[in-house]
Structure formats: C-alpha cells, structure tokens
Image: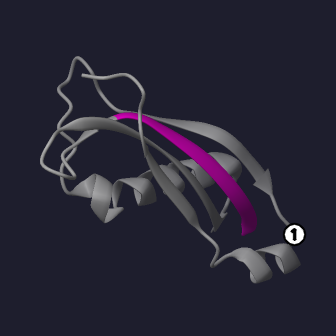
Amino acid sequence: MKRFRIELRGENFLLNLDGEPRKFGFHLSRYLRAVDAATAEKTAAIQVRQIPTLKQGVGNNSEDPPRICLQQIREVNPLRFALCHKRQRFELCVEEDPL
C-alpha cells in the first residue's frame, strides 16, 4: 500500500455549536494508507464525516449542501509517514457569509 498526505477543505456546514446556527468551514490534513490516490481521497472524505463536531448535526437542506474539496494529495515516503501519521490537523472556522 502507498502512503499519502491529504488536505481537505470543507465549506458551508450549517452547525449549531453554541445555540445559534451558523455556517462553518474547516481545513483538515491527514496521513493515511491506500492503494491509490483516489481511494485515499474517498477514505479521507468518509473519515471527515465521522468527526463528532460534524457528525452531530449538519443542518443544511438539499438546496444548500455542505461541500468537501480536495486541496492537495501527495504520496509520502515510508519514513515521513512513520514520523507524521499521527499528526492530524482539523481546524473549524466560522465562515464570513452570514445566514
């Protein structure tokens, strides 16, 4: 299996984290193993949806769905993977666009 570093960006996630629904975005970086880059991207997208903050209640309707976009994917060597695979970044931020 190959080793990859993946960076994803999420947009338009309607979440109620503090009593008032607002739209959030996120940046995520993750190291994982996969057969190829396409499988790594799909696996990362599935893992994102399992993050408790996002899983607990995305309130978007079908006309205004949240989006997850691939920012970067690259294959990394086994040494870098061994040193960094536990480093995973997830940054949630309020989007500028008000409801």
Looking at the image, is 64 positioned above or below residue 6? above
Query: Residue at the location (43% across, 55% down)?
Result: 48
Q: Classify residue 84 as left or right of residue 55.
A: right
Identify the image quadrant of residue 61: top left
Q: Nearer the viewer, residue 59 or 93?
A: 93
Image location (x, y in percent) of residue 30: 61, 62
Q: Classify residue 13 as left or right of residue 25.
A: left
Q: Nearer the viewer, residue 50 or 52?
A: 52
Identify the image quadrant of residue 2: bottom right
Q: Which quadrant, please, contains the N terminus?
A: bottom right
Give the residue type at disc 1.
Asn
Region of the chain picked out in magenta, as a range: 1-12
Query: Residue at the location (87% across, 79% down)?
Result: 79
Question: For numbered disc 1, what is the local secondary structure?
Answer: loop
Most prominent secondary structure in the magenta stretch? Answer: strand
Image location (x, y in percent) of residue 90: 51, 59
Q: Disc 1 designates what residue?
A: 77
